[in-house]
Image (cartoon, rainbow, N blue to C red):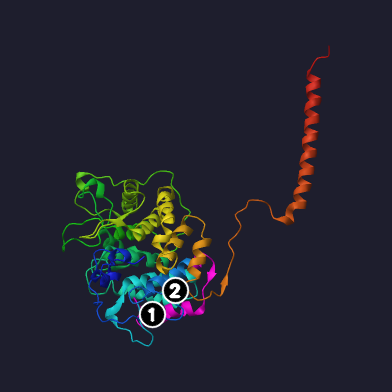
Amino acid sequence: MLTAARLGAAALSSALSSVLLTGLAAAPALADVPTPAIPEGLYGKGDPTYDGVWRQSLALTALAGAKVTPADSAVAWLTGQQCEDGGWPSFRAAGAACDAKFEDSNATAIAVQALLALGGHQDAADKGVNWLKANQNADGSWAYNPGNPGDANSTALAISALLAARTDPATVAKSGKSAYDGLALYQLGCAAPADQRGAFAYQPTAPGGALAPNSLATGQAALAAAGGHLPVATTVRSDTAPKALTCTDAAATGPVSRLDSGEAVAAYVTAQFASGGNHLTLTTPGAAPTPDYTATAWAALGLIQSGHPQQATDAVDWLTGQSATWTKNGTDAGATASLLLLTQAAHGDTAPLTGQLTALGPTPKATTAPAPTTTSEPAHNDGIGQYWLIIVGGLVGIGGGLLLSLQRKRTPRP
C-alpha cells in the first residue's frame, strides 16, 4: 500500500502498476543500487529499499489488530529506523547514518500510526508527530520529502497520523493554513465536472493548474477526510448513501468545505465502485488501465470510517476474491497487511490473512485467540438456566390455570 511519492524511484521502471502509484516525486535513480540483505525482524522477503518502513508499519498495525504480539526484533527494527530528529526514511541499511533529505513524510506518518497501535512507544511516536509538524508546508500541505511541493497522499497520511496521536489537524498549521486547508487544495469541487466532484488529485497538473482525479490520492484522502487513521475501528453507521457535493453558483470556484469533504469523496468513491466493477482503476500513460488494489482498499477503509460500510461491502468482497493476485499468494507483506486491515475494519474472517502475515516475519511473542462469535451462554451458566426454565415453566402453568379458571367463571353454565 505504497503512497505516491514513496515510489518515485519506481517511476523509472515498468513496475509502476505493481507499486500502485501515479504522480511521483523525484527520487534517487535505481541504476547501480545493490539490493540490501533482508534485515532480521523485517516482514517480507522483497527488496526493502523503497518500502521497508512502510510494509513493516502496515504489518505491525495489522497484527496489533489481530491481537498478535510481534517479536521484539520486528518492533526494534522499526524503531531503529527512526532518525534523531524524529523522522523516518523509507529504509536505512544497518549502520548507515541518517540523511535528512531521505527522510519522508509517508514513512513517518505510517510508522507513527503503527507504534501508537502497538502501544508502549509514545516517545518515538511523539517525536514523529513533531517531525511532521516541523516539515509542514506553508500552504498547510505535506510533501513526500521536505522542501518539495505538497501532494494529497502525503498530506492525507500526515493528517491520519495526527488523528492517531489525538492531535486535531485543524490546529496544526503553517502561515495560518491548517492541515485540512492543505488537503482541500487537492479535492475537486464544484468547478469540476459533476462525475469528478469529491475526488482528489495527487497534485495540480501544473502549479496553480487544473486538478485531475487520481485513484490512490482519492483513496488515501478518503480516510483522512473522514477523520480516520489506521487501524479503522469505527462503529459509526449511516443508513443513507453518502451525500454528493451540493453545488451553487457561489460555491463553483471555492474549495470543498471541511464539513462536506468526507461525504463528497465518499459519494465519488461509491459511484466509482458502482460503475467500475467494485474497484478503482489505475491509469498510467502508455499502459492499459488496471485494477488498483491499494487505492480500492484505502477507499473502502474511508467508506467504513465515514459510516458507510454498506457501500464498501462489494469492494471488500472483490478485493478478497483478488487476494491471491494482490498479495502474490500471501508473500507480499504490504499487500497482505493491507488486506488484513481492511478485513478487520469490515468485520470479516481474519484468521487466514493473520496466518499468512505472521508467516512472513519473525515468530511472534504471543497470539491471543479471537473471542468466540457464538451467542450461546457459557457452560457454567447451564445449571442456572435449567432452574430458570423450571421457574418460568411453573409460572406459565400457574398463569394458564388462572386464565382457565377465569374463563370458566365467565362462561354461563347450561
Specify the amino acid type for callout 1: Gln
Depth check: give the residue in front, 212 or 86. 212
Q: Quadrant of residue 143?
A: bottom left
User: Helix, strand, or loop for circle 1?
Assistant: loop
Would residue 172 appear left or right of 317 to someone viewing this image? left
Q: Earlier in the sequence, mark 2 or mark 1?
A: 2
Give the residue at mark 2. 43
Would you call the spot at circle 1 few (<14 residues within 10 Å), some (14-19), or many (20 or more)? many
Residue 133 lies, with reference to residue 385, above or below; the image says below
Res 288 label: none
Query: Which residue is under mark 1?
Result: 82
Residues drawn in magenta: 63-90
Q: From the viewer's perspective, is 251 left or right of 292?
A: left
Residue 264, position as x, y percentages in the image = 31, 50
Q: Residue 122's image quarter?
A: bottom left
Looking at the picture, how far across and down is residue 400, in whole percent? 78, 31
Label 2 sits on a secondary structure element that is loop
Give the side of residue 158 with respect to residue 372, left or right.
Answer: left
